[in-house]
Each structure stands twice: as structure tokens, then as C-alpha cells.
Image (spheres, rainbow, N blue to C red):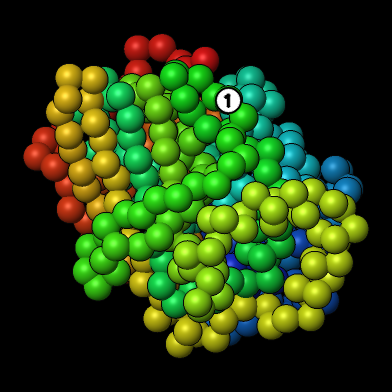
Amino acid sequence: MTPPPIAVYGATGYTGTLIAAELARRGVPTILAGRDALKLDAAAATARAAGGEIVGVRAASIDDPQALIAAFDGAATVINAAGPFIFTGAPVLRAAIAAGAHYVDTTGEQPWIRDTFDVFGADLEAAGVAAVAGMGFDYVPGDLLCNLVGRTAEPLRQLIVAYDVHGFDPTRGTMRSSLEMMKGGDVVYEDGRWVPAPTGVTRASVVFPEPAGRQTVSRYPSGEQITVPRHVRTRRVVSLLSTRAVAPPGMERALPILTPAISAALRVDPLRERLSEKIGELPEGPPEDRRRAVAWTIVCFARGEDGREARGLVRGPDIYGLTAVTTVHGALLLAQGDARGAHAPATAFEPLTFLEHLAPFGVSWELPSGAGAPAQPPASAPA
């Protein structure tokens, strides 16, 4: 059976190109969409040369709602790969809903993930379509891991998810999204509710499996803060990132101390805009050999209210290549299923089955006993 058409918005960017290639590899009819008609034509020629079935090439500006709706006409799912998503997410999701299409994206921006639930949840339900934001490396492996580990010790007093990334070269899009993330305004899940994130210094370390070992970590405004309380019964979520993932060599230990000042500086619009302009002068993304050489590990520690503890990990290579795999697989599963409303990865898809799909890509995991048992959602939605 021929899969339904999938639309890719931002198809000419670094990640969008990888997504189009993954759709071609899986034989999925594809609609390429974005803002630049000439770049789209070139991307379509490249995709067809690689064996891709391009069924539409549609230019649509982010500020033209009718053009966006027309761009997604006939698509079963829209994959949004154009960030920063705090600017592009709402127009693209709104158009996908109007076109009767499901939606996934590659965001790492926590505020936008929260908006998919709080702002668009009811509209998605009414339209009979689903949205899963953060369907790339941010935050599919982590969200699935938290579900599989956390469920074995529920109800939880605390769940900690910590990321270590080595050898990462961000794309221009990732850097621009990071500017938006670092300016603050994120939330944390404390005492069973979402509250504004603290602004002070985080001084901590986490022991990752070798070869990473003990790493200095900083507070991370991750999507798991929004998604995990929707499928794991926990009073608290802590998300951390190794400083070597983002700090220049030699600055790893200093980054947690500097982060509050950096966040305050980035709340000044002219500075953020100037930095965005400078980012535009950089290469679009890492060369293929550098991209594939990235190594990442995510660990999860859960402590139950009764004192039980559980831990697990997931690791793999090539963050941007993985993002292409996870977004395409998620888009196809939504197109073939009956999900509706806003979802976390672990509520839209069966967590262990989804991880197993990633094994051929080089993703591996270690889980506590009983982690593969059927999921039981929280008795009530968090506050």
C-alpha cells in the first residue's frame, strides 16, 4: 500500500533536506513546502534524483495563512522543520489543522511545546487531528525513556532526565532557536504543577556511562518538563544538560555560573537580533562526517514516593540524522492511526515499539525490569 503524502515545511533547510531524503528512502509521496520557490525547485530536483516521489512543490510564506493551507492540501501529516518555532509553529500548525492534516515538528523550544497543548489542544480535538511537537532528538528519546523508566516506580517523588552530547555542531536553525530558549521564560514542574523556572545558578554533576563519565551539568529548559507529567505520575521533573554540549572548550565548569547573565542579556531584543544576523553568516550546518560523529546519551533517574528507585538510558549517534528518522516515522504513524489532540511522544506512540524502530539507526537502551509493560496514563491531567 502506498503511504499517504507527507508535507515538509522548511524543506530547503539543513534538517528539512534530511527529512526529505528519509521520506524518499521510505518511498513516501512528499510535498515540499517553504518560503523560497527557487530553493524548493532545487530541493525537488535533488530529491527526485535520489528516487523521491515529489507530488507537490509549494511556496508559502509564514505570514500568508491561505497559502500555507493550500501548501498542505492533500497531506496526511505536516512536518514543520522551519524554526525558530516560537515564530513559525503557530502559523504552520493552524494551517495544518485547517487542511485536515496531522502535525509534527523538530522543535527544541519548550514554550512552543506548551502552546501546542494549551493554545491548540481544543482545536486539534475538534478537527480530529493530532500534533506532536518536539519529534526530533529534542525530545523523542528522552520522553520515551522517562515513560519507560518512570512507570516502573510510580507514583514518583522526582524524575531526573539528563543529556550528554559530545562532538555536536549545531545548524544555523538550532542556534537561532537556542537564542530564544536561552532568554528564559520557561517553566519547571514542581509539586505537581508548572511554575516559572528558577533564575539562579545550577551547580551539579551527573555520572554518565563511560566514556563520558562524570560531567558538569546545567539546568535545561527541555520539553520533558511539559510532556512527561502528562504520562508519568510524578511530583517533580528535573532536566539537565552537560555543559560540554554547548560550552566552548575550557568553559564547561564556568557555564552554570554565567548562564543567568547570558539569559538576561538575551532578553534584550537588539542584541538577540544582532546575534541572529551573525549566525546567518555561518555555514548552514555541519558536514556529513561531523554530523554522523556525534555521540549522545540520555539518562533517567526515578525515585518513587515509597523510596523505590529506577534508572535507564538511551544513546546513539547523529542528532540531525536521527531527527529525520523520528519525525518521518512519527508522521507516518499519525497518518495511519486515529490519534487526535496535542500529544507527548509517549502518549502518541507506544514507547518501546518506537525505540525498537530506532535500533537499526544505532540507538540502544538499557531499561529497568518491567519497563516494557503496557502504559497506564496518569489518573488525571496535571495542573
Horizontal side of 359 relative to 6 (left or right) equals left
The tally of labels here is 1
Horizontal side of 195 relative to 314 (left or right) equals right
**Quarter of the image with the N terminus in it:** bottom left
Of residue 328 and residue 108, the one placed in the foreground of this image is: 108
Horizontal side of 241 relative to 80 (left or right) equals left
Residue 32 shows up from this direction: no
**Please, is residue 240 above or below residue 111 in the view?**
below
Q: Circle 1 is placed at which residue position?
A: 195
Identify the residue shown where x is 86% and y is 66%: 274
Of residue 170 and residue 266, the one placed in the foreground of this image is: 266
Residue 260's x, y, as percent? 65, 49
Of residue 304 and residue 264, the one placed in the foreground of this image is: 264
Of residue 196 and residue 126, the one placed in the foreground of this image is: 196
- Residue 110 occupies quadrant: top right
Identify the residue shown where x is 53% and y is 64%: 254
Q: Secondary structure at mark 1?
A: strand
Identify the residue shown where x is 79% and y is 80%: 281
Residue situated furthest left in the rendering = 369
Residue situated furthest top in the rendering = 380
Residue 195's x, y, as percent? 58, 25
Residue 54's x, y, as percent? 62, 68
Identify the residue shown where x is 88% and y is 48%: 63
Residue 14 shows up from this direction: yes
- Residue 275 occupies quadrant: bottom right
Horizontal side of 33 relative to 55 (left or right) equals right
User: What amino acid is at disc 1?
Assistant: Val
Residue 342's x, y, as percent? 55, 30
Crowd band around label 1 with a 10 angstrom C-alpha radius: few (<14), some (14–19), many (20+): few
